[in-house]
Image (cartoon, helix red, strand yellow):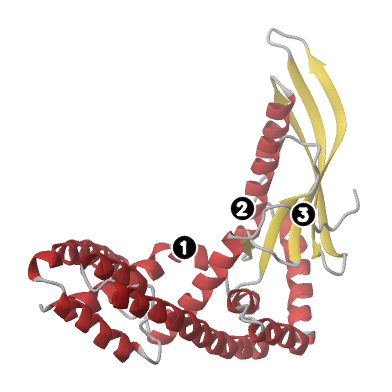
Amino acid sequence: MNAMEKIKLLLVLLIISILGLKAQTMDDFGKIALKVQVADKKIPDEAKAALENKMKQIITHFGIGSLDGNSRFVMEARIDVLNKDIVAGPPQRISQKLEITFYVGDVIKQKIFSNAPITSTGLGTNETKSYIAAIKQINPQDEKFKSFIDEGKNEIIAYYQTDCAQILNEVQSLAAQGKYDEAIYNLALIPDVCSGCYAQSLKLQGDYFTQKIETEGKALFTQAKAIWAKQPNSDGAAQVARLISRINPQVSFIQSVNSFAGEVSAVVQAQELREWEQQVKEYNDRQEAAKQQADRNFQLEQQRIRAYREIAVEYARNQPRTIYNTLIIW
């Protein structure tokens, strides 16, 4: 394998490894999806985390996706303490009877679609453990949650079917500002059950994905060429490798990138290619691992959809966790 082929391989393997890292986190895109949140600030953080986990289990069991990023549609919980007693010890314990009310709704329109109240009692050596004990009693597969989830699901479908044109216009505005990640994220939220709107969103995701990789790729390529002009040596080559490995191989100018990579490798002396050899070996190892997990029948269009959703996942991950919008005025 000559130096140019090694550099090409380095590029391809890096993209494959990146796209394969977070496959499980993409599964919730393309579904009707909700963000779970406990807007009540009075309960302990540990109890809040336990309740959010239960909520994710509920929506997953009934066929809904769970999102961590910004979303107008949420499943929200409120806890009211109906009764609290101190149980004599040793050890002294706290017993709390809680009413936990779940809501599904739209935080932008401040509209509740459905609700499901339950009561649960927890006993613990402190208040936090008492909350957690009560939350543990919740059965995520309880059929009482089915109609609650279905009502919310139907309202969300109606929103996408009715307001599809407005949603797409807003997304196009984001893309016009160069906010491709946010645009793709918002498009990825459109569920596939809304077939007409979903088909349009998928086409736009492809358009914006192309615009994104072209814009970012050209910037990286320009930077790589500038570095090489100043440092046509092994140090410069290492920097160039890091930059061009981030250029998506689907860009229209990939042949120019490959040619440039070949020029770089031709200049670098044989003894200076040892770093390349090590990098290629590492990426070969990653490729082998990826091959073992990959679906042999995975089509190119599916790979592109996963690439769109990877952008949406990364955008969601970078959003602040602070809750600004809730369904209920506390």
Drawn side of residue 270 relative to residue 238, left or right = left
- Crowding around mark 3 (Cα neighbors within 10 Å: few <14, some 14 to 19, many 20+) is many
- Disc 3 versus disc 1: distance between alpha carbons? 24 Å
- Crowding around mark 2 (Cα neighbors within 10 Å: few <14, some 14 to 19, many 20+) is some
Circle 3 sits on which residue? 76
The residue under the point 27% across, 69% down is 236
Q: Quadrant of residue 317?
A: bottom right
| Front residue of 150 and 217 | 217
Q: Position of residue 139 (x, y in %)?
A: 66, 46
Circle 1 sits on which residue? 24
Q: For mark 3, give the secondary structure.
A: strand
- Identify the residue at the far right of this view: 329
- Identify the residue at the far top of this view: 90
The residue under the point 67% across, 53% down is 321
Q: Are marks 3 and 1 in contact (CB under 8 Å)?
A: no
The residue under the point 52% across, 83% down is 209
**From the image, which quarter does the N terminus lie in?**
bottom left
Q: Quadrant of residue 198?
A: bottom right
| Front residue of 45 and 215 | 215
Which callout, 1 or 2, points to the residue nearer the camera?
A: 1
Q: Position of residue 293 (x, y in %)?
A: 31, 66
Circle 2 sits on which residue? 57
Drawn side of residue 257 relative to residue 67, left or right = left
Q: For mark 1, give the secondary structure.
A: helix
What amino acid is labelled 2 in the image?
Gln
What amino acid is labelled 1 in the image?
Gln
Q: Are marks 2 and 3 in contact (CB under 8 Å)?
A: no
Residue 265, relative to residue 87: is it above or below?
Answer: below
